[in-house]
Image (tube, rainbow, N blue to C red):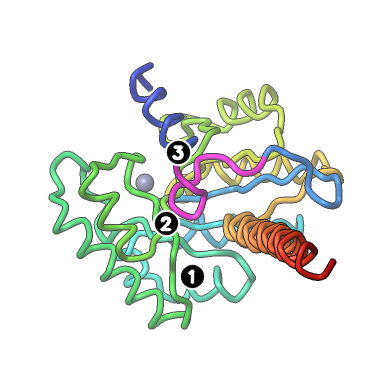
Amino acid sequence: MSALRQFFKSSLKAMLPPSWLLIQGPQSASSTGAAEVALTIDDGPHPEHTPRVLDLLASAGMKATFFVVGDSCRRYPDVVRRIAAEGHELGNHTWFHGEPSRTSTATFLKEIQQTRQLLRDLTGYDCRLTRPPKGELTLGKMLGLWRQQQTIVLWNVDPKDYAMHDRNEMLGWSKKYHIRNGDIVLLHDDQPYSATFLDRLAAQSLKQTHFITVSHWLSRHEVMSVDRQREIGRNLSTHEEQNAAALKSPLAS
Ligand SMILES: [Zn+2]
């Protein structure tokens, strides 16, 4: 990623609330003190790799977020239903996963709507998370997504599994990866190496790490926002009471 793009991303991250753009989860400790990591798995569903990934997640007690492609959901609806039934989260990854520079804003937004509708039909779940293919967006696409009340979800950890050639490459990367609180890890289930990574994570029996869905953080942020609003509300009313008392006291005395 170019330095300019990195700068643009971190500026946006600092300016926008997580419900608009999420690149990394909260790095502050969770209430339990455990690290929280979101595994995000893109480009499926795939008829072989996705069920294998789901088996591994189930046996390790991990939750993940699957950014699915609409056209593959149409072909493998049972896999989509299984993702939802096992408590994982579904995110929107467009209908055709076209090359971003060749996809117009209108086509992109239409594909988001089409995929959202299919996910609703298959699972009853109204998908509010979008990950654009390759993480590439224009201002027009971003504004269109926010108008559709979508949270744009990117990532901060990328093993580049799509460019790997064998399991050993993934094992090599996994050994070097040190989990940090708030990591959003990008994986793909249209090829086999995400399963290799999950296998290794499960073998490490990470008791101090919780693998959570992306919405877990968003709901935590909303709770925090509501708490903050209440706090502001309380401070304001205390301030108003003090002002009222100060105004009343000269009259009362
Ligand atoms: Zn993708």
Q: Position of residue 56 (x, y in %)?
A: 68, 55
> What amino acid type is highlighted by mark number 3?
Met
Name the side, left or right, on which 189 lies relative to 253.
Answer: left
SS at badge 2: loop
Could you tell me how far apart the alpha carbons at marks 1 and 2 are, in whole angstroms? 9 Å
Which disc, if any, is residue 44? 2
Above or below for 179 versus 231: above
Left or right, 179 with reference to 102: right
Q: Which residue is mark 1?
A: 79
Most prominent secondary structure in the magenta stretch? loop
- Asked whether residue 23 is drawn in magenta, I would say yes
Q: Are marks 3 and 2 in contact (CB under 8 Å)?
A: no
Question: Where does the image place residue 142, in percent across and percent down from the top left?
Answer: 29, 49
Q: Where residue 6 sits in the image (x, y, percent)?
A: 41, 24
* Amino acid beneath label 2: Gly
- Is residue 91 rendered magenta in the image? no
Q: Is residue 176 left or right of residue 91?
A: right
Characterize the local packing of mark 3: few (<14), some (14-19) or many (20 or more) Cα atoms within 10 angstroms: few
Give me the residue at 44% from left, 59% from top.
Answer: 129
What is the three-letter code of the residue carrying label 1? Val
Q: Could you give the CA–CA distance between mark 3 and mark 2, rounded to whole angstroms?
A: 31 Å
Q: Residue at x 34, y 19 (%)?
A: 4
Quadrant placement of the C terminus? bottom right
Q: Tag 1 or tag 3, which sits nearer the N-term?
A: 3
Is the CB–ligand 1 distance for label 2 below 8 Å?
no
In the rendered image, which residue does mark 3 sit on?
15
The one nearer the camera, 39 or 151, is 151
Query: Which secondary structure, mark 3?
Result: helix
The mark lying in front, picked from 3 and 2, is 3
**SS at circle 1:** helix
* First to last magenta residue range: 16-26
Which of the image's four quarters has the N terminus? top left
